Image (cartoon, grey):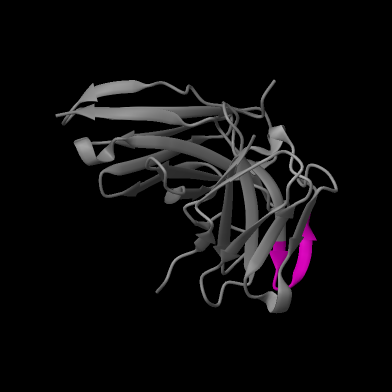
Amino acid sequence: QKEVEQDPGPLSVPEGAIVSLNCTYSNSAFQYFMWYRQYSRKGPELLMYTYSSGNKEDGRFTAQVDKSSKYISLFIRDSQPSDSATYLCAMMEDSNYQLIWGAGTKLIIKP
Amino acid sequence: EAGVTQFPSHSVIEKGQTVTLRCDPISGHDNLYWYRRVMGKEIKFLLHFVKESKQDESGMPNNRFLAERTGGTYSTLKVQPAELEDSGVYFCASSRDRGTGELFFGEGSRLTVL
């Protein structure tokens, strides 16, 4: 069983829709939860970062962490074609600085 | 501010040859990481430098891989001799702090071993 599970998609939605992306994990020691965005042939770019449980909002993006369910989500409001990319979740323990990654979900926003 | 730069962007070599990948981190970032993504798999950690010291190299697959960071600036990752399963994209990342997961990634070096 993988430590982090993420549906690879693709997920195709119309422009303006609310997008919901999620990951589940098995390691209860994870404390840092990140969402990275990766465009084709580029490196991952940090979008959202959360420590422990709770919600975090930044513009059109909201990250949620539910540690009791071992489930994290990223919501994108008013999605734009420029949001089309692969979204990767990554997690890390407190004292181990290795990021553990999901497979990435390919998101397509149709104009 | 310049981002993380990696060279080459793509390398095609024969099995048994040697390849050296280079990473220049963001200036002032003491932490430098190497990650790798092979086809169809998740991104995997290789190793972590703090300045010129290897903090964690537990992700290095075997002794055909050698990473260095001379003087705590740029880093190189050498694969010698390369095998078919080494093909993938090698990402370098850097950070100012090491405990947060807020990494800045380069665009990656794509390695194809034939």
Magenta stretch contains residue A18: no
Whole-percent x and y of residue A53? 52, 42
Q: Nearer the viewer, residue B34 or A23?
A: B34
Please give the count of numbered marks on the rendered protein.
0
Q: Residue at x 28, y 21 (%)?
A: A12
Magenta stretch contains residue B56: yes
**In which quarter of the view is residue B28 placed?**
bottom right
Q: Residue at x 49, y 48 (%)?
A: A50
Q: Residue at x 40, y 74 (%)?
A: B1
Q: Is residue B9 left or right of residue A4?
A: left
Regarding residue B93, the answer to whether it shows in the image is yes
Whole-percent x and y of residue B24? 56, 68
Whole-percent x and y of residue B6? 53, 60
Q: Is residue B79 left or right of residue A23?
A: right
The range drawn in magenta is: B49-57
Q: Nearer the viewer, residue A81 or A65?
A: A81
Q: Classify B23 as above or below B47.
A: below
**Image quarter (top left, top right, bottom left or bottom right) of the C terminus of chain B:** top right
Tell me the chief SS of the magenta region: strand
**In which quarter of the view is residue B66 placed?**
bottom right
Whole-percent x and y of residue B59? 76, 45
Regarding residue A80, the answer to whether it shows in the image is no
Q: Classify A33 as above or below B114.
A: below
